[in-house]
Amino acid sequence: MTAQPGPTEDELNLGLLLFIPYRALENRVFEALARAGFDDFTPAQARLMQRIGPAGTRLTELAEAAQVTKQTAGHLVDQLERTGYVRRTPDPTDARARLVRLAERGTAAQPVAAAVVAEVEDEWRRHLGERRWGQLRASLTALREITDPYR
Amino acid sequence: MTAQPGPTEDELNLGLLLFIPYRALENRVFEALARAGFDDFTPAQARLMQRIGPAGTRLTELAEAAQVTKQTAGHLVDQLERTGYVRRTPDPTDARARLVRLAERGTAAQPVAAAVVAEVEDEWRRHLGERRWGQLRASLTALREITDPYR
DNA sequence: AGGAACTAGTACGATCCTCGAACCAATGTA
DNA sequence: TACATTGGTTCGAGGATCGTACTAGTTCCT
């Protein structure tokens, strides 16, 4: 990335501007999950798990969405399966494929994570004010149109 | 097909909303640097290098800013030093410390990275429009006040 | 049909990243 | 001067990630 913090504090490199709040949110969620007893998984596993849809998601799809190789995704799913967060079930529409879906421990963790995210969003909303918050969300969503290859 | 993130398309998890553009930008910068001949460093190294100030930065500071341990930071700086991107110089104000600063290869890569960032920013600005773009930047900067422990 | 081309996933091995524990040397403090 | 703190390093272990190569099932083309 860039380096060069820039002339002023406010002119901070865009990459960092995006990364800093992302990381802050991730940390908060992690911390809360650990406190709730879900302390046996790693950030990489979580980033993958996050992409699992309610009806299950194929490994290849997970890999693409998380931007890792199939091997990496498979490796992470192995671990998540061993610790009871996800389960692999056959895909009825394709005998080669299997659907990765949340298992008991995974579904148990989900509301905890969701609650923290909501809490953090509230804090940010209060900090920015309702209007600016809505604009931020809208702009980020709009940005997705040109930055997210997997919509 | 199966990927159904959750509520609605527009209600996408905030973490992802931040992460997606971040990752897109990072990828672009990486790609451009590789094309310019700077293909001998890794994302982790880049994330650290990014935090080096123009006057040099201490290892501990780098570690904190990048949110990795001192050992990890040291490891990465070792590599960056070996490949000629950074240099360690003694810190005149403290004999224990050393300042990590960009070396030739590092300063050579900087403008290339800056150019791509500017290019991407332009694309995003065009996509959002001048006004929304300014608001986005401003909001992210404001968010830093409550999410960045190392200002 | 029948075979070629493609896709989902796995296996192996190498490299990189990250951390915890333990340690040394310089600095600050009582 | 002793004690605690801080900047960094060393060592060793476990995770994460990838490239290459492979198997099994699916799709496409003729």
Image: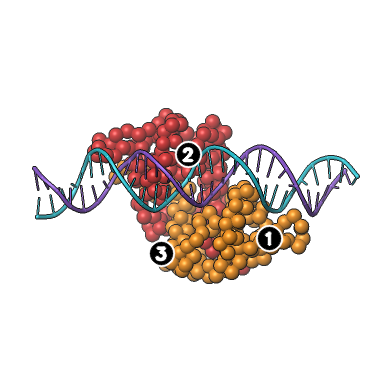
Chain colours: A red, B orange, C purple, D cyan
Chain for mark 3? B
Q: Distance of mark 3 from mark 1, alpha carbons?
A: 40 Å
Circles 3 and 2 on the same subunit: no
- When asked about the image quadrant of residue D3, the answer is top right
User: Please, what is the three-letter code of the amino acid marked with disc 3?
Assistant: His
Image point (47%, 34%), residue name: A109
Residue mark closest to the camera, 3 vs 1: 1
For the N terminus of chain B, which image quadrant? Answer: top left
Residue mark closest to the camera, 2 vs 1: 1
Q: Between residue D21 and residue A78, name the one nearer to us.
A: D21
Helix, strand or loop status at disc 3: helix
User: Please, what is the three-letter code of the amino acid marked with disc 1?
Assistant: Leu
Q: Position of residue A35 (x, y in %)?
A: 57, 33
Q: Position of residue A146 (x, y in %)?
A: 38, 59
Q: Which residue is mark 1?
A: B99
Image point (67%, 53%), residue name: B60
Helix, strand or loop status at disc 1: strand
- When asked about the image quadrant of residue A94, the answer is top left
Image point (41%, 50%), residue name: A67
Q: Which residue is mark 2?
A: A114
Chain for mark 2? A
Image point (53%, 54%), residue name: B44
Q: Distance of mark 3 from mark 2, alpha carbons?
A: 30 Å
Determine which of the numbered discs, if any, sits on residue A38 in the image: none
Determine which of the numbered discs, if any, sits on residue B127 in the image: 3
